[in-house]
Amino acid sequence: MGCFQSTARKQFPGHEDPVILASQTAFSVSEVEALFELFKSISSSVIDDGLINKESGGMGLLFSTWFHLMMEEFQLALFKNRKKENLFANRIFDLFDVKRKGVIDFGDFVRSLNVFHPNAPQEDKIDFSFKLYDLDSTGFIERQEVKQMLIALLCENEMKLADETIEIILDKTFLEADVNQDGRIDKSEWQNFVSQNPSLLKIMTLPYLRDITTTFPSFVFNSEVDEIAT
């Protein structure tokens, strides 16, 4: 473990002990170390400072990583829109940037990615998905926020719907979710809506994270840390 820690601490601000990170997440120690290799690939893509930077292209790479894992591929360097401004990419970055510094360090990366693990608590996934749509962080999901996110997701998949169709989708969504009909969705309403429409949480689980060391052996770090029982 000494070699891993001394090197990582010197080169990566915010690095944390993989054993501690494993104890706080659904990842094993070896998986945390594999994620460290992935983190290095992203953080060194433009500015090799040990951080994922929003302004230097790191946001696009982070999103491409998340997107291709979700799409059951891993083509980090090939994502065609990685330099393109994207609302969804911005939102993912902002939620990973828990310290609100415009950068993501390794500890933030692992803890944030943990919510997408198949074994992560359902409550955490619901909470993250609520924040994803609550663009203004008001504690409510407004109709315009859902519309913005829907359009962003459609654009990312190179799809386009007529304005009338989008409005119909929004009408149906708020008819079901906005129980008290105040024109916005609160946290309790979102929980109920998601429980009735579990497919909404599909993007909140990345099956490959169950064992990233097996799925992506090129990211396995030659660990000197003995796996511990959790």
Image (cartoon, helix red, strand yellow):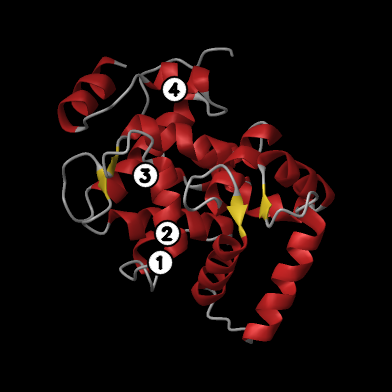
Element under label 4? helix
Label 3 vs label 4, nearer the camera: 4
Residue 191 falls in image quadrant: top right
Residue 86 disc label: 1
Give the Cα separation between the discs numbered 2 and 4: 25 Å
Disc 2 versus disc 4: nearer the observer:
2
Viewer-side label of 1, 4: 1
Q: Earlier in the sequence, mark 3 or mark 4?
A: 4
Viewer-nearest residue: 208 or 223: 208
Would you name the residue on which mark 3 appears?
38
Mark 4 Cα shell of 10 Å, populated few (<14), some (14-19), many (≥20): many
What percent of the width, then of the height, locates residue 11?
17, 32
Quick one: SS at disc 3?
Answer: helix
Q: Amino acid at mark 2?
A: Ala
User: Between marks 1 and 4, how big is the CA–CA gap?
Assistant: 30 Å
**Residue 164 vertical placement versus 67 (above, below):** below
2, above or below 130, in the image: above
- Please say if the residues under marks 2 and 1 sit with CB atoms less than 8 Å apart: yes
Where residue 32 sits in the image (x, y, percent)? 44, 30
Other residues around mark 2 within 10 Å, as few (<14) / some (14–19) / many (≥20) = many
Q: Which residue is mark 4?
A: 21
Amino acid at dot 1 = Asn
Answer whether labels 2 and 4 touch (C-beta < 8 Å). Answer: no
**Residue in the picture at 64% in, 87% down:** 162
Q: Spatial distance from mark 1 to mark 3, Cα to Cα?
A: 22 Å
Looking at the image, residue 6 sits to the left or right of residue 177; the answer is: left
The amino acid on which the numbered mark 3 sits, given as a three-letter code, is Leu
Amino acid at circle 4: Leu
In this picture, residue 1 sits left or right of residue 64: left
Q: Are marks 1 and 3 in contact (CB under 8 Å)?
A: no
Q: Which mark is residue 89?
A: 2
